[in-house]
Image (cartoon, grey):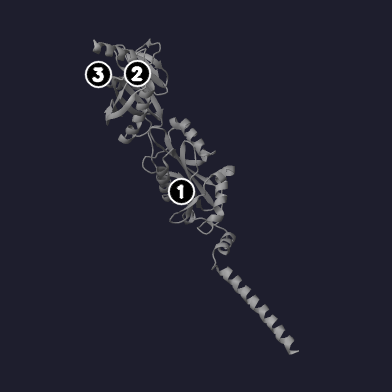
């Protein structure tokens, strides 16, 4: 009797009392146009259905399903799926107020020709305290990652696993993953190979790319070379390399303290005072400046690298808390640039700039020594005249 009561309680939690608690409509085929999926689900009843999300229960319960997508198209690797497990955990916590969710198994397999991350997550139903199990899957779509979660009471383990197999083998993907390119970025300033995991953005990612670009403060992204690195579970990192018609004069350790405030003002305008001073980053053939502004919800690093008579403004933005990874990627990028143009894009300075730099910061500059010498000679001449005048005065 106790077992029957517990089963009834689980069914209540998975139906009107717990899982979705909405009116249900019956169908077998469900189009999710934004996700690029057609779900063939005989025997299932929809509790929520849109172009981007599906939730339902099986009429022979107690099994529930949730299908949705997240932005950006990552490679299907074990690392990506492990971090994507966060999405499945968040979903079961949202729908069922699940507790103690933990990943029990994770592997990469091929399902219906698709590389797919397969996960098993155990948890506890909050409302009834009973053990639950979730069989999940994640696979790539055009600019997206699709997630499938089939779950229910742990006592129905075999049935839930079989339901996932059935769903994955019968769904139709109308928007398969787009081809990606990790070719080096090229522009008039030169070219640079992309670090591992980075690639060119996809057309289907344009909306999310625009939002991420806006966070960097860049207003002319069409004038910049761009690359992205999907970073499950919460977004992507973005790299922008933008040529600027800026010229700041000779940059080295001596002139940096004087020039740094002008760099900061150029980058951040009225907010420059709120940004920590930049720091020099020596490269083999020139010197860059790196800034680390505070940015809510993201991590941002900006490097100014002189080339010819211009500046390459390099921005790299990633999720909050990814400072070390963002810094490492930025340094790798600016260190790997193959510059084009005369003298490999070496910074060009006018004769006047070179002269003023030497006069201002080099105590042994020839002209400064000449001036000092002339000054000394002048002082000596004046001294002789004064002494001579004194001698003459005494002789009178």
287 relative to 34, above or below: below
Sequence order check, earlier mark of 3 and 1 = 3
Residue identified by numbered label 2: 127
Furthest residue in direction right, as rendered: 396
Q: CA distance from mark 2 to mark 1?
A: 60 Å
Residue 117 visible in the current orientation: no
Write down the quadrant of residue 124 in the picture.
top left
Question: Nearer the viewer's eye, disc 2 or disc 1?
Answer: 2
Furthest residue in direction front, as rendered: 2
Question: Nearer the viewer's eye, disc 3 or disc 1?
Answer: 3
Count residues near mark 2 (Cα–Cα under 10 Å), then give few for <14, some for 14-19, many for 20+: some
Residue 332 visible in the current orientation: yes
Left or right of 293, for residue 4: left
Whether pointer 3 and pointer 1 mark residues with C-beta atoms closer than 8 Å, the reply is: no
Sequence order check, earlier mark of 3 and 2 = 2
Q: What percent of the width, then of the height, locates residue 102?
A: 30, 29
Residue identified by numbered label 3: 155
Furthest residue in direction bottom, as rendered: 395
Under circle 3, the secondary element is: helix
The N terminus lies in quadrant:
top left
21 relative to 295, above or below: above
Compare residues 379 and 390 and report the one nearer the observer.
Answer: 390
Compare residues 267 and 285 and report the one nearer the observer.
Answer: 267
Q: CA distance from mark 3 to mark 1?
A: 61 Å
Residue identified by numbered label 1: 190
Left or right of 30, for residue 347: right
Q: What percent of the width, then of the height, locates residue 115?
A: 30, 30
Under circle 2, the secondary element is: loop
Compare residues 108 and 90 and report the one nearer the observer.
Answer: 90
Query: Which residue is at 56% across, 54% downward?
Result: 259
Q: What percent of the width, then of the height, locates residue 351?
A: 58, 61
């Amino acid at each position: 009797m106790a077992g029957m009561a517990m089963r009834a309680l689980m069914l209540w939690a998975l139906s009107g009392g717990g899982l979705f608690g909405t009116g249900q409509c019956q169908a077998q085929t469900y189009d999710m146009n934004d996700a690029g999926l057609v779900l063939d689900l005989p025997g299932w009843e929809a509790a929520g259905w849109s172009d981007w999300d599906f939730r339902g229960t099986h009429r022979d319960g107690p099994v529930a399903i949730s299908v949705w997508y997240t932005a950006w198209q990552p490679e299907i690797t074990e690392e990506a799926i492990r971090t994507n497990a966060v999405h499945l955990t968040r979903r079961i916590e949202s729908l069922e107020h699940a507790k103690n969710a933990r990943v029990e198994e994770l592997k990469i397999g091929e399902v219906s020709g698709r590389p797919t991350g397969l996960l098993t997550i155990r948890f506890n139903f909050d409302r009834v305290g009973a053990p639950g199990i979730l069989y999940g899957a994640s696979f790539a779509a055009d600019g997206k990652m699709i997630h499938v979660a089939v779950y229910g009471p742990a006592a129905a383990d075999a049935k839930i696993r079989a339901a996932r197999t059935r769903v994955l083998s019968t769904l139709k993907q109308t928007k398969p993953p787009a081809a990606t390119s990790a070719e080096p970025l090229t522009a008039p300033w030169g070219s640079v190979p992309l670090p591992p995991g980075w690639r060119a953005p996809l057309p289907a990612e344009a909306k999310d790319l625009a939002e991420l670009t806006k966070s960097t403060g860049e207003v002319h992204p069409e004038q910049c070379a761009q690359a992205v690195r999907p970073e499950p579970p919460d977004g992507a990192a973005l790299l922008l390399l933008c040529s600027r018609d800026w010229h700041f004069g000779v940059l080295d350790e001596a002139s940096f303290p004087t020039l740094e405030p002008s760099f900061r003002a150029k980058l951040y305008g009225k907010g420059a005072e709120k940004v920590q001073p930049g720091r020099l980053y020596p490269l083999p053939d020139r010197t860059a400046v790196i800034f680390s502004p505070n940015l809510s919800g993201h991590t941002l690093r900006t490097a100014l690298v002189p080339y010819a008579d211009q500046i390459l403004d390099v921005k790299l933005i990633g999720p909050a808390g990814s400072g070390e990874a963002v810094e490492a990627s930025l340094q790798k990028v600016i260190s790997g640039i193959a510059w084009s143009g005369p003298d490999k894009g070496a910074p060009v300075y006018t004769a006047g700039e070179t002269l003023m730099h030497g006069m201002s910061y080099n105590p042994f500059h020839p002209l400064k020594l000449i001036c000092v010498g002339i000054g000394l000679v002048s002082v000596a001449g004046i001294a002789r005249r004064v002494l001579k005048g004194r001698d003459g005065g005494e002789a009178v």
